[in-house]
Amino acid sequence: MIRLSGKAITKRYGATRALDGLDLDIASGEIVGIAGPNGAGKSTLTRMLAGEETADSGEITLTRGDTVVDEVWRRVAVVHQEPHIWPNMTVEQNLAVGREGRWFGDITPEPVSAKAVLERLGIAGFAHHELADLSLAVQQRVEIARAMLSDADVYLFDEPNSALTEEESEALFATMAELAGSGKIVLLITHRLNDFVRCCQRILVLRDGRIRCEIRGAEISETSIAAQLTPAETAEREALPASARTAPKADGAPLLKLQSCSDRFGAFRDISLDLAPGRVLALSGVEGSGARELAQAMGAFRPFRDRSGQTFTTLDQASVAYLAASRRDTVFRNLSVGDNLASRLAGRSLGRLPPFIDPAKIDALAARAIKRYRVKTGGSHAPITSLSGGNQQKVVLGAAMEQGTDIIVIEEPTRGVDISSKADIYELLRDFAAQGRAVVVFCTEVQEIFDVADDVVVLSHGRIVGRVDMAGIATIPELADLLASYEAV
């Protein structure tokens, strides 16, 4: 029997109390979910178990039978929401890090075959590819593979399937069940309430730095979890479907016009579309469809090629701010909340006499932006890493909006974000578009498209195969069936 215990754990970041006397008691043999809204302390607890943070007070202990384990973090494997990988190394080399002795022929036997794990996760074909050249979904599976090869006592999965398909998610849940069945401690942190219902035997609800309640067995449902996550005074605000919103029809010239444009690497081809002001456009398609790559090109992150073979970017037509799917690529982790909010500004926005920066000007700008973009933080000087994932995303989005750009292109805008922050982000995006600007989102979830988009462009095998005006869509199942029919073409 393996047991993980925490007693009166506290952790502060300035005026913010991330963990407030948290108690924890988890035994091996079951999958335990840890639920909580953004800012509840989940990320802090994860970093603490991984050895990335130390408690201000209290203690964490791990016992195997009657033996107390020294340095608990060495026996914990974490699958992070944002993959902790080395992009300049191959998949195989990433798996070898920390296991070099076994990899190169140490007499210590391998508990699990690396090749078998890669095959099981469907990424064996990428073994010799550098991570920088692979999609976020593959990077996520490499992170999972590293955890599976660690032979740890505790496996903590933090939003592990946020970039995975439904089929890949099912395979992951089966692996988690096998780990629990073999006598390991398995913890799942996610904002997808249905994932808790599908695979957990027990749910611990974390709010304001403490475990506030426990839900067991037959009592576990999306409704029961949601009721515990959101106090009555901040009851869940549901995003309106596009059919119930009053998004304006296109007036004036398109902000961006594409005519027979292709990707120079072949990810998409012969793309023609107009991006109208005042609208939120969703790009939909499975990985490999070209939808993600089209979003990156529209965000000026990769070049287009026209029919004549000339390359160009959207910056030739309109000002664009691009936000990648992974916050590791959009957040300056060594800077404060205020500095992140000001990070995309330049010139007189930051000081009276460029290139000199006026700290008071940044402080005033940050204070306004924190309120405008509904960022929950202890102040503009708080480290960005002290914020929850949802509040970090609002900072990233706020920094882009402060630029005064014409178009925002954002991949998976609410990946790993709780219900309340999702509603905030959708509202911010719609408000931005309503100012005569435009938003392009690449979405992997039908729910998100339904909640935020005014128009949808569906891609398959690199080509546009369907277009949807969301004003004519009444329900999520109706939208799902329509998108599936297009993607099957």
Image (cartoon, rainbow, N blue to C red):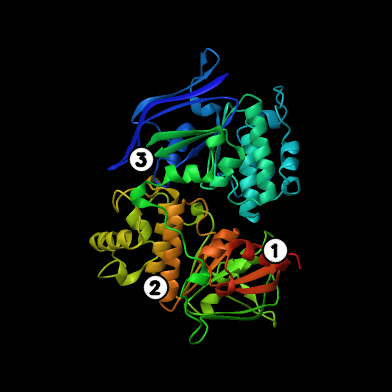
User: Horizontally, is 151 left or right of 243 in the view?
Assistant: right
The residue sitting at the front extreme is: 218
Q: How crowded is mark 2: few (under 14 residues within 10 Å), some or many (20 or more)?
A: some
**What is the spatial separation of the Cα atoms under label 2 and label 3, in whole angstroms?**
35 Å
Quickly name the residue at label 1: 484
Q: Is residue 80 above or below residue 312?
A: above
Q: Where residue 125 sits: x, y (%)?
A: 76, 48
* Amino acid type, residue under disc 3 in the picture: Asp
Res 208 label:
3
Q: Which of 140 and 101 is in front in this view?
A: 140
Res 218 label:
none
Q: Helix, strand or loop at disc 1?
A: helix
Quickly name the residue at label 2: 404
Q: Which of marks 2 and 1 is in front?
A: 1
**What is the spatial separation of the Cα atoms under label 2 and label 1, in whole angstroms?**
36 Å
User: Horizontally, is 183 left or right of 235 in the view?
Assistant: right
Quadrant for the N terminus, please: top right
Q: Helix, strand or loop at disc 3?
A: loop
Q: Helix, strand or loop at disc 2?
A: loop
* Amino acid type, residue under disc 2 in the picture: Gly
Determine which quarter of the picture holds residue 20: top left
**What is the spatial separation of the Cα atoms under label 3 and label 1, in whole angstroms?**
40 Å
Q: Is residue 222 above or below residue 354?
A: above
* Amino acid type, residue under disc 1 in the picture: Ala
Q: Which of marks 2 and 3 is in front?
A: 3
The residue sitting at the top extreme is: 66
Q: Where residue 176 sits: x, y (%)?
A: 64, 35
